Amino acid sequence: MRYQPPFNSSNADAPYVNGNPVAGIQGSIPPAAAIEHPQRELVAIIEAVGKAPSDENVRQVLNALRSNRIWNPLVETGATVNELLLTLPALDNVADLSLLHFTVPTGNTAAVTLTVNGVTKPIMTPAQEPLPAGVLIGGSVAMVAQVESAWVLLAPLAGSGSSEVVASGLAPLVFITPGMYDIVAPPIDTWTQRIVTGGGGGGAGSASNYGGGCGGAGGTSISFGSLTPNARYAALVGAPGAGGTIGNIAGQPGGMSSAFGMSATGGEGGGNDGVNGYGGQGGVGTGGQLNLRGGAGGNGMNYPSMFGTMGGASYWGGGTRAGTSTPAEWPTAAWGSGGGAHYKTAGPGAAGQVGAIIVYFLR
């Protein structure tokens, strides 16, 4: 909307003045657009949050701006698991650093794209990497920021898919089941150590003459600090990456974990290109006072030199070894570590290990 100057002025930026017949000053004549356009702008704000303009309520614009629902779009019918399609009513474009929050329809199984008003961009992690599988949880609320050619996931916020956990006393909090959590701090001042680890990548499967690569470990971010009494903190524990199936199928990446302003991406799945099995790279921690990369998974070799190695080691310990039996017979490994691959015979790879969020109360 542009400025509408008085009708009886040739200056495009002329101010409005009151008439004064005694002083010989002619009052400004307002053009129709000066009255109509501001009303339409205000009505558009009210309707953008799903409300009907009313003659009785003169605070509708204020309520609309405070509601933040202008940035709460609709998920269009027809959107797929990893291709989200959103509409922001009556919005021509979205400026860089704009924040957008939306309800996730279902969990992602791979990298995700977000189409807003017909413009498609990938959703990236804070480390500017493609979103790993298992980061978006169905029913939760995600918040992203537009940064040039991508949307950056800032936080998977606590929503209907989250579980509330209230800290009791100073006992450590341990979260090792994938999903969303709403952590409520104790009612007293506390000093804590917070550790966030992403999920481990799965090991690759193999055909009869090929050895698969093992999965990488999730990254880890560590910080020390106080928690505000009774404050709520959203947390996400990354899922383990699935192992590859029979037939030189790569393992899946582990899911990202996040909490307390930190995030840790999951490890890559181990690969198998039918010649050599390459180990998955480790995930990366960001946002902490100490940020660690997870260990890479070991490579596999093809026939006749087939051998298996180990899944990548996480902050918490080593990964699953490679094997020739079924993954169910392989030993459990440390949180966030990579899964072992299959070698020598046809078989599936092992899944990585679940991510972790641990809170120690030091005082």
Image (cartoon, rainbow, N blue to C red):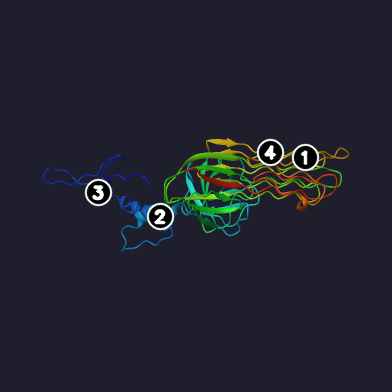
N-terminal of the pair, mark 3 or mark 4, is 3
Secondary structure of the residue carrying tag 2 is helix
Q: Amino acid at mark 3?
A: Ile
**Which mark's residue is nearer the viewer, 2 or 1?**
1
Q: Amino acid at mark 1?
A: Thr
N-terminal of the pair, mark 3 or mark 2, is 3
- At 38% from the left and 47% from the top, the residue drawn is 1
- Mark 1 highlights which residue? 309
User: Looking at the image, do the residues carrying marks 2 and 1 touch, with CB atoms under 8 Å apart?
Assistant: no
From the viewer's perspective, tell me whether residue 269 is left or right of residue 67: right
- Mark 2 highlights which residue? 67
Disc 2 from disc 1: Cα separation: 54 Å
Q: Amino acid at mark 2?
A: Ser
Disc 3 from disc 2: Cα separation: 37 Å
Tag shown at residue 29: 3
**Which mark's residue is nearer the viewer, 3 or 1?**
1
Tag shown at residue 281: 4
N-terminal of the pair, mark 4 or mark 1, is 4
Disc 2 from disc 4: Cα separation: 42 Å
Residue 220, compared with residue 164, is above or below; it is above
N-terminal of the pair, mark 2 or mark 4, is 2
Can residue 42 be seen by looking at this rendering?
yes
Residue 241: x and y, percent?
Answer: 68, 48
